[in-house]
Image (cartoon, helix red, strand yellow):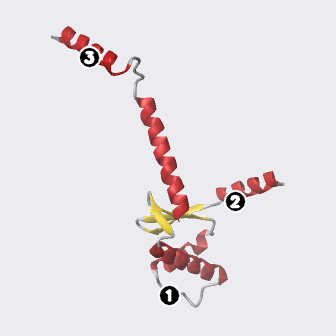
Amino acid sequence: MADKTVAQVQAKQSDWMLVELNPDIHVKTPLPPQCHSALRAGFAGYSTNPRWNIAKLQAWRLGRRWRDEMAAGTMVVVDSLLMSQADGEVFQQEKMRVQDEAVQKALPEQEGGFLRSLMAWSRKKTAIG
């Protein structure tokens, strides 16, 4: 039964869209495209539109809540993506780990340490000179 839950969550996450809240901040959300303007309006601090349906009003409230949480510091912007502070820390740690792995792959393996690399350098220097 737990496998079904994981599969359902993964299927639901594939429906998520990247929405631009303002030119510098984006967010991933499962809201339908019809509600994105109300979400942006709530995040920007605009008032509600009396002609909105319930779904748009809820999207507006969500945008307002994200704006308030960002002001309070419980949500942060990482690489122009709005996320909770805990997710932001995990994202930063994963990003650093990936960068460290890339650097380790780019560096050539040196056997023998500093002395051997110094000897190789001196040989190259005499061959050049």
Coordinates of residue 17 in the picture (x, y in percent): 58, 61
Q: Which residue is depicted at the point 58% across and 80% down?
A: 61
Q: Which mark is residue 96?
A: none
Residue 16, how many percent across, how many down?
A: 62, 61
Q: Amino acid at mark 2?
A: Lys
x, y percent for residue 112? 39, 17
Tags 3 and 1 touching, CB below 8 Å: no
Residue at the spot of label 3: 121
Closer to the camera, 34 or 92? 92
Q: Residue furthest bottom?
A: 50
Tell me the distance, in whole angstroms, between the alpha carbons under discs 2 and 3.
Answer: 57 Å
Residue 44, picture quadrant:
bottom left
Q: Quickly name the residue at label 1.
A: 47
Q: Could you tell me the amino acid type at mark 3?
A: Trp
Query: x, y percentage for residue 117?
Result: 32, 18
- Marked residue nearer the N-terminal end (2 or 1): 2
The mark nearer the N terminus, 3 or 1, is: 1
Q: Which element type, helix, strand or loop, lies under badge 2?
A: helix
Q: Is residue 5 left or right of residue 20?
A: right
